[in-house]
Each structure stands twice: as C-alpha cells, then as structure tokens.
Amino acid sequence: MSALWHTVVRRTLLAALVLSPGLAGACSVPVFRYALERWSPDAYEAVLFHRGPLSADLQALADALQHTASNNLANLTLERVDLAATNSEAVLQLWRRQTASTLPWLVVQCPRSREMERPVWAGPLGDPVVRTLVDSPARRETAARLLKGDSAVWLFLESGDKARDDAVARLLEGESRQLEKILKLPEADPDDPRMRSDLPLKIAFSVVRFPRSNPAERMLLAMLTSGDDGLSTSKEPMVFGVFGRGRVLPPLLGTNLCAEVLQAVAEFVTGACSCQVKELNPGFDLLIAADWDALLEGRAVKDPELPPLIGLASFASGQTNMPATPLVAAQAPVVPRGPDAVARNLVVLLGAGVLGLLIATVVFRVRTCRKNSRLEPLNLAGGASVPASRGQATDRLAGTLAPPTQFLGEEVRKPPGSGPGSA
C-alpha cells in the first residue's frame, strides 16, 4: 500500500471518529486535560555518525545530548554510531543516504508514529541548530502555558509581513477571549478516569508568536513544516494549535485561518475525550524539553536543568556563531519507517467500510468550508463571527483536515500530520 493511500485511509478513519464518537471508549474528561496527564510525547530519534574519537568540544556536546536523552529531559533518543566499528546494515543504509555530509554528522528523525520518510533535520554536530535541538524560546513558553493549565496554545508562525501578522494576532486574541466565554467544559461523569493532578480545570487559550528569521527557532520551524514541501516554502502566516504535552494539530492558513476553524479546534481540545488512544487522534508531538511529570508527582513545575551546552543558555552565550546548514541537509530518499505489514493490513480492513461514505462527506465539507469562509488571506482582520453550533464548527474542522487532494479532486492544501479525529 502506498504511503499516500495509507494516509488517506488513516485520515478517513480519524474522520470516522469525528462523525461517530461512540465508536471508541468515551469519558467526559476534556481532551486537553487527558492528553496533558496521560499522553507521553513520542520520541525523536537522533543518530550521531562519527569515525573514531571526537574532538574535546564536540565530545562534550555529544555527552550533553546523551545526558538529555538518557535522563528524559526531552522526548529524544540518541544512538552513537562509529562508522569504523559498526556492521549494522540498517544504520549503514541511513548513513549512505546522507549526501554532502561531514563527520561527525547528526540525523534527527521524527517519531515513527508520524511516518515521515525523511529526517526532520540533518547536519554537522557543531551546527548551531544542535544546541537548540530540544529547547527554544517559543517551545519553552508554550510548555510553560500548557503546564499552567491552558487548554491550547496558538503557536503562530509569522509571515514577515507586519500588517498581516498583526491582523492574525488580533484575530487570535479576539477569538480566544470569545471562546473562553462561550465554550463549556463537559459535565463530569462518576465513571470518568480520575484526575492525576491538582491543576485547576479551565478553558483558556493563549498565543505564542515567533518569526521565521529567529535562529533559535530553526529546529521548531523544521518540525512544523518539514512534513510538507508546500509548507516549508510557503510564506503565509500559519497557526498551529498545541495542547497536552506539546501535541501539534495541522496548520491553519489561508482561508482556513478564520474564526470558524479556530472554534472547531477549540471545541476539539475542550470537548469530552471520546477516544483515549493518542495514535488515533490528529497531530504529532513536538521535540521539547519540559518536566511534564512534575504535575503528576506534586512537584513544583520548573524548566528542566539542561546541560550547559544545550538549550537557551548556550544559544544566548554566543557559542553558536558557526555557519548554519540548511534546515534539512541534502540527502537521498530515506526508507519509510512506518508500521509493519500487519498494522497496514489492519488499517486497510478498518478503513474499507467507511472510505467511500467519508470521502463524499469530506468533499462536501471542503466545498462548504470554502463557500462559508469569511476571512480571506489578505483580509485577516475581517471580524468573522463565531458559528452558532458546535456541529457547524466540527464540520468545518473535518473539511480543513481532509484527505489528500489527489483522491478528492479538490485543490486544497494538504496539511502535515494526521487527519481529523475525536480525542
């Protein structure tokens, strides 16, 4: 089964969860709270290629990465590969696919659940990006707000056009305040899973904006846009809803960056958790350094103590003045690391029964989404009103996260990550 067709089936199944939330075990705990307390972020897999001993400064940097991974300071694993000693064919295949590479060379791969065929970043170990691999101002602020109880953070990637970006910021702030007033938490059920922390349960949204030009955010930019060539080259303002432990929903841009879709995303994260399996929900996890378990263990929440060579302290100290490589270095195609044949067959069997109906439904919703869009890309301060019903907003979200356009005959941008689902 091709990767594209697998994506269609996967997204169709997720759309089924939106349309029929009763298909999965339900509870009335809000999605954002269930995710914060129970969904561990998937690990990014880093492979460090070298030949023989490293220089003292690069050895210290490698040790700092190893310390970060081994002590669970971030959702990262690190494998060191000495090309002079290894005989692992799988590892050697990954190395052979790197081009224009200079040892020591670091390859950072997305979590396997994201099923991306290429690394999110690859470059020399001494590149400045490595020092902010797990930490950056925008990610740190996003994690801090989620740990304080925000339902979701609107992570706003600016376009560079100040007037347009300010209009998006006004839209996000205005709609956030409106949504905080009109949305309600689900009614508690005696059979609900118990809350694992004493964090107050509330509906709250906030905005974290960052420019594309900020060198400290190059890794974050790569994570958000590397799943789609159109996104990586687009200069549009983009908004990513982030909830739980740094789980990112597909981007909102163009005509989908409007009040209706913002409400749909907000209703998704604040609604009752009708599917408790993280992998059946839309989005992917950011690589981020955060002490998520502090909430569950009753400890004071604070920034993790990263090694001196890793994180914002290193970046601010001027230790990153080396030439920067592209976000993703040139390389040959990478073999997909998706699920095995059994899992793929299961997806096909589950999706066959709902594929036809849902594709027709999504086509209708995409067209409705376009027709009803009240906010054009160049008029982002249009003041679109909030739809009256939860169903209308959920319909709009399903259209936004529609399957790839090759199978729909619609010229709609295909966002990265999974399709619509019920949390």
Image (spheres, helix red, strand yellow):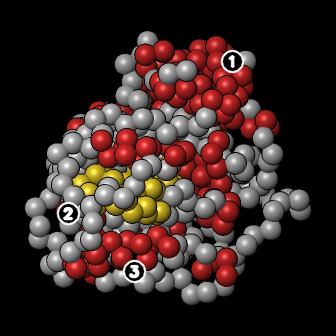
Q: Give the number of the disc on residue 306.
A: 3
Query: Residue 129, percent across and down?
Result: 25, 63
**Closest to the observer: 237 or 186?**
237
Which residue is more in the foreground, 305 or 126?
126
**Residue 318 is at least partly visible in this image:** yes
Real-space Cα separation, disc 3 to disc 2, in angstroms: 18 Å
Disc 2 residue type?
Answer: Asp
Point out the residue furthest to the bottom here: 300
At numbered mark 1, what does the secondary structure look like: helix, strand or loop?
helix
Q: Earlier in the sequence, mark 1 or mark 3?
A: 3
Query: Residue 397, position in %: x, y?
Result: 53, 36
Residue highlighted by disc 2: 127
Q: Residue at coordinates 63% horizontally, 59% vertically from top-left? A: 39
Mark 2 and mark 1: Cα distance apart in space: 46 Å
What's the mark number on residue 352?
1
Tell me the mark number nearer the camera, choosing from 2 and 1: 2
Assign the N terminus to one quadrant of the image.
top right
Pick the residue in front: 224 or 386: 224
